[in-house]
């Protein structure tokens, strides 16, 4: 297992192909994917394709969506990370957690660690994040991180808000 980061309560590691079932489990809750536009991951073949085609290539850039675990139990609670979006030439912050871990500060703790990594280790100048307008909890996380509202956008087919961190801001 390749650990990437640690916080007070969490650790982050690269996904492996053996984690395909974790993606299925995470995305099987309609509340978890309500604002993502992704929908459920249907089977192991699709989960493995997501890992090999979307998640693993990002690791070559020293970033990506990383599995997030509780330190004290090693339990997988979701993912968080940065993703390069080639079409827009942007770095996107994203996270997704099992519903039972919502409202416990894990999204903020994880996203803060990822932002610190992006800024201080990867020396990124800009990081963006999109959240569906109805997803007020996620928007609150972005505001807690000190990201600045950039404007309205679309997240898949849902109206969304775009936030940005710029290196010249007071992070």
Image: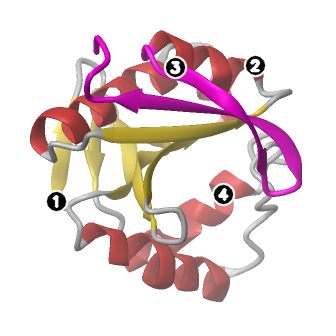
Main SS of residues in magenta: strand
Crowding around mark 3 (Cα neighbors within 10 Å: few <14, some 14 to 19, many 20+) is some
> Residue 84's image quarter?
bottom left
Q: Are marks 3 and 2 in contact (CB under 8 Å)?
A: no
Q: Earlier in the sequence, mark 1 or mark 4?
A: 1
Residue 170 falls inside the magenta stretch = yes
Residue drawn where x is 69% and y is 19% of the image: 137
Q: Work out whether mark 4 precedes mark 3 in sequence or the reverse, and give the earlier one.
A: 4
Magenta region: which residues?
145-171
Numbered badge on residue 2: 1
Task: Give the alpha-carbon distance from disc 3 to disc 2, as whole Å.
Answer: 15 Å
Foreground disc of the pair 1, 2: 2
Q: Nearer the viewer, residue 86 or 56?
A: 86
User: Which residue is tagged 4?
Assistant: 25
Which type of secondary structure does the marked residue at label 2 adopt?
Answer: helix
Identify the residue position indicated by label 2 in the image.
Answer: 136
The residue identified by callout 3 is 148
């Amino acid at each position: 297992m390749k650990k990437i980061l640690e916080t007070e309560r969490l650790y982050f590691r690269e996904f492996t192909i053996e984690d395909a079932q974790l993606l299925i489990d995470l995305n099987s809750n309609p509340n978890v994917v309500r604002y993502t536009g992704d929908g459920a991951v249907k089977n192991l073949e699709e989960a493995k394709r997501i890992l090999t085609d979307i998640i693993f290539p990002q690791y070559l850039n020293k970033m990506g969506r990383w599995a997030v675990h509780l330190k004290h139990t090693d339990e997988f609670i979701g993912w968080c990370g940065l993703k390069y979006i080639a079409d827009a030439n942007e770095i996107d912050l994203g996270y997704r957690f099992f519903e039972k871990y919502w409202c416990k500060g894990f999204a903020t703790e994880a996203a803060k660690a990822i932002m610190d990594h992006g800024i201080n280790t990867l020396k990124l100048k800009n990081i963006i994040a999109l959240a569906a307008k109805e997803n007020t909890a996620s928007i609150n996380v972005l505001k807690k991180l000190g990201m600045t509202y950039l404007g309205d956008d679309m997240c898949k087919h849902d109206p969304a808000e775009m936030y940005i961190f710029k290196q010249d801001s007071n992070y």
